[in-house]
Amino acid sequence: MAPRILTLANQKGGVGKTTTAINLATALAAIGERVLIVDLDPQGNASTGLGISRTDRDVSSYDLLMGDAKVASAAVMTSVPNVAIVASTLDLLGVELTIAQQADRAFRLRDAFRAMNDLTINGQAVSYVLIDCPPSLNLLTINALVAADAVLVPLQCEFFALEGLSQLLQTIEQIRSTLNPRLSIQGVVMTMFDRRNNLSEQVLADVRSEMGTLVYDTVIPRNVRLSEAPSYGKPALLYDLKCAGSQAYLRLATEVIRRERQLMAA
């Protein structure tokens, strides 16, 4: 069975995309899934946050997009059991210039995934692919949306949260109607929630009234451990399993799997 491909996208930076990619992958693996992360952000924070040093990125997501490598040769195992990653390098900054004139420029990642059967994790097929996008709606993000089954949108509990969301939803709708008719929205996850802050409560209420059941029940709190963990090259779930952030991502993983079952049954 082909893996489910979830793209984590938001054109705003600092909303918790990479933190969500790393910790959701770890939480999914903890409940028995086999997960591949594809780091499509030139900054490479997901790769660094999983302990993959820049010197160990001989084959990267750039090579996938260029058609120079298959997923199986680009993926490396991380220190997290059942989680592999296709790391990112700064070469990704040049992708747009290199392939902008190519007719298949939006389909490069989708085509690379079609040859993914060679990749196994501990002898078994990958069950989820999480794509960590850059904080912009550029050709890298478009490739990720065209390759995906569904989009997961991390949204920070701050005043302008909804403003950026409408632009992203418009892009998702355009891609669904032109390039990827199977694309759906898996859900919106509210991040950096601070119970002591009335604004966080207000933003959460506004987003729930606007987006309804698309917003996950699980809310990711503002949490020091979540911020500290990447500097140790670990997901928060390995750094401090009992912290509020880790526990929230375990709940989110359960919700994601439940929604996936509903999407596939629909």
Image (cartoon, helix red, strand yellow):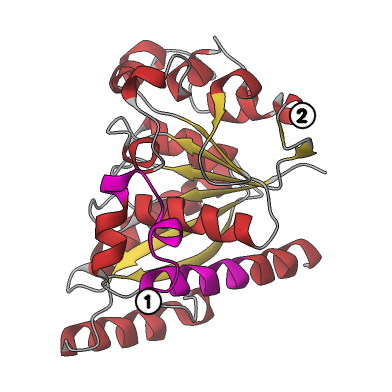
In the image, the segment drawn in magenta is 230-256
Residue at position x 53%, y 80% in the image:
213
Answer above or below: position of 34 versus 217. above
Distance from the alpha carbon under mark 1 to that under mark 2: 36 Å
Residue 186 horizontal/vertical position (percent):
56, 63
| Residue 74 within the magenta-colored segment of the rendering | no
Q: Is residue 93 visible?
A: yes
Quadrant placement of the N terminus: top right
Q: Main secondary structure of the magenta part?
A: helix
Question: Of tags 1 and 2, which is closer to the observer?
Answer: 1
Query: The residue under label 1 is which amino acid type?
Result: Ala
Q: Is residue 179 visible?
A: no
**Is residue 32 found left or right of 240 in the rendered image?**
right
Residue 224 horizontal/vertical position (percent):
23, 67
Which label was assigned to residue 117? 2
Q: At numbered mark 1, what does the secondary structure look like: helix, strand or loop?
A: helix
Earlier along the polypeptide chain: callout 1 or callout 2?
2
Of residues 169 and 243, the one nearer the viewer is 243
- Quadrant of the rendered image containing residue 166: bottom left
**Is residue 1 found left or right of 99 in the rendered image?**
right
Callout 2: 10 Å neighbours few (<14), some, many (20+)? some
Query: The residue under label 2 is which amino acid type?
Result: Asn
Residue 66 horizontal/vertical position (percent):
49, 13
Residue at position x 46%, y 21% in the image:
60
**Is residue 14 found left or right of 244 in the rendered image?**
left
Callout 1: 10 Å neighbours few (<14), some, many (20+)? some
Answer above or below: position of 136 versus 54. below
Q: Which residue is mark 1?
A: 244
